Amino acid sequence: AQEYHAASQTVALADISNRGRVEVAGADRVKFLNNLSTNDVTKIAVGGGAEAFFLDARGRILEYACLFGLPDSIWLDTQPQRAPL
């Protein structure tokens, strides 16, 4: 009960170090990711984020990721199986 209260009313920490992380930088990063994902990456502001799927040519899901806007890049938080071994 105390952990639930702390998580819902104050602050909680979660270890997500097993997840994969990819940083996409460069002048065309938004256009590049916008063409590859299901979400409108042009609407991700610095400090904001969005969820997106990455599809193959047939529209099948290859990857699910959370995208986070930084001043000079976009970070993708990916599923644990995408993290380096």
Image (cartoon, rainbow, N blue to C red):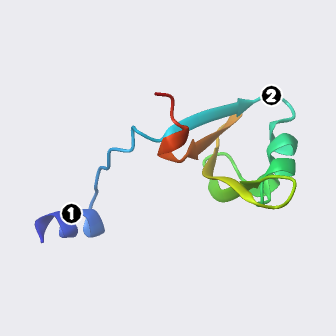
* Crowding near the residue tagged with mark 1, few <14, some 14–19, many ≥20 C-alpha atoms within 10 Å: few
Q: Residue furthest left?
A: 2
Q: Residue at x 46, y 27 (%)?
A: 85
Residue 68 sits above or below residue 53 on the image = above
Relative to 85, 12 lies left or right: left
Q: Which mark is residue 54?
A: none
- Residue at 29%, 50% (x, y): give it: 13
Kind of element beneath mark 1: helix
**What residue is rendered at 71% in x and 33% in y?**
24
Place residue 29 in its image quadrant. top right
Task: Find residue 14 and report its horizontal and vertical position in percent.
Answer: 32, 49
Tell me if residue 69 comes above or below residue 43 in the rendering. Answer: above
Q: Quadrant of the N terminus?
A: bottom left
Residue 41, how many percent across, how many down? 78, 53
Specify the amino acid type for callout 1: Ala
Left or right: 5, with 17 as reference point? left
Give the labeled residue for mark 2: 26
Q: Is residue 49 visible?
A: yes
Q: Position of residue 38 (x, y in %)?
A: 77, 60
Q: Which mark is residue 6?
A: 1
Which sits earlier in the primary sequence, circle 1 or circle 2?
1
At label 2, which amino acid type do we have? Gly
Looking at the image, can residue 72 be seen?
Answer: no
Q: Nearer the viewer, residue 28 or 20?
A: 20
Q: Residue sitting at 52 percent across and 38 percent down? A: 20
